[in-house]
Image: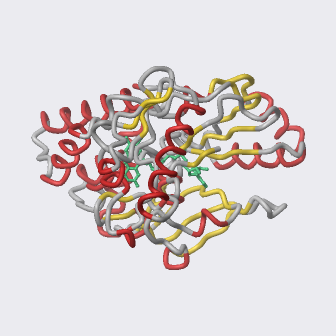
Amino acid sequence: MTNSRNELFNRICKRQVRLAEHTSYGIGGAADYFVMPANVEQLLSVLDVSQSYGMERIVFGMGSNVLFPDKPKPGTLYISLKNMTDVTVNGSGWFVSSGIPLSMLSLAGLLAGSPEFQFTYLLPGCLGAGIYMNAKYYDEQIGDKIEKVYYIDLDDPTLSLQTIHAKDCLFAYKQSIFQHKPWLIVGAQFRVPEQAGELAVCLSRLLTQQKAANENGLSSLVTFYSYFSREIIKLQSRRIRIPEPMKHIEQYRTEKRHFKFPSCGSFFKNNYAAGLSIGAMVDRLGLKGLSCGGAVISPYHGNMILNVRQATASDILALKDTVSEAIELHYGFIPEPEVAIL
Ligand SMILES: Cc1cc2nc3c(=O)[nH]c(=O)nc-3n(C[C@H](O)[C@H](O)[C@H](O)COP(=O)(O)OP(=O)(O)OC[C@H]3O[C@@H](n4cnc5c(N)ncnc54)[C@H](O)[C@@H]3O)c2cc1C
């Protein structure tokens, strides 16, 4: 068993992989070890072998909310779950793996006639991180849509699959229990029973097409946007009506230039007690358009720090510090980054 796991690990683990290619920021040096397991069995082998070698591990999905280092720590294993895209129908519920793109859920919902996931349209990233971050759009959030989450406790030597009910996941604004535990999210069960079978079938079909169309996944925002906007046009040509909320999302995100430059979306979490969004504060402080090296604070959205010209992680962090200091000085608190600085 251990030998076959070692063989598998050696076969699928790549060396010297540029992390920049696996994040929407387009930033990050070469990782010594990099792996994208395709299913739970491969993931368990990777975890088992890397644990036995005592390797430091960093888990992520599509990389649309992480800032990778310019020089990754030697010996670290980076594990992306974006290739774990199984969907299984189980009675009236359906299990969806961590690597399913959030935006794919909105298309599957559309095909199945369910309005449940319209808010995830053009939301970059995968389901696993969507649960970890409790991804949201206006007043809808992923934590309200799931029934239970399947995870692996990395501190548990048996690495067995565990479940937790959504009500125990401590979901709140950009918060979940997973941010406070060494738990790796494997997938989730959804509560859309009446359309379960149809939705799952739609998802499987879309995923097969996506894999064929784009072997490298959807970490680049340009690829991400062109893929999903093409899919919507295809659906329209089949006389499927695009609901107004999804049209508004497209309009909002293109107006804010979300897909024009590499970024990780909003850099900081909002502090609602302050009564003003971080974007509005940055605007009032006159920081929009400020640049450092190849990075710039978006002129269109004060809470986004863009990579406009081969920025480094240090460029992004310098602008992050400038914004933090100015907000602390003028508004009396230090904003909490939403982007995971690895
Ligand atoms: C242009 C743009 C617009 C955006 N708009 C929004 C928005 O409207 N609303 C919103 O909520 N977010 C938004 N985001 C942020 C991003 O879409 C979400 O945070 C998304 O959930 C990230 O998914 P990912 O797979 O890319 O995560 P990654 O960047 O790969 O990972 C993010 C974090 O989750 C952890 N993680 C990832 N997978 C797992 C797992 N399986 N188990 C445990 N931990 C895990 C990682 O360690 C990391 O800390 C936007 C990003 C961009 C680039």
Report x, y in % for residue 192: 34, 67
The image quadrant that residue 4 belongs to is top right
Q: Position of residue 46 (x, y in %)?
A: 76, 43
In the picture, residue 135 is in which quadrant? Answer: bottom left
Q: Which of the image's four quarters has the C terminus?
A: top right
Tally of marks: 0
Please name the residue shown 84% across and 48% down the image.
Answer: 51
Asked whether 300 or 228 is in front, the reply is 300
Quadrant of the rendering where the N terminus is positioned: top right
Q: As rendered, which of 60 and 342 lies closer to the eye?
A: 342
In screen coordinates, is 34 left or right of 173?
right
**Relative to residue 138, is residue 158 drawn left or right?**
right
> In this orientation, does residue 249 appear?
yes
Foreground residue among 263 and 321: 321
In this rendering, the answer to whether 140 lies above or below 315 is below
In x, y percent, where is residue 100? Answer: 46, 46
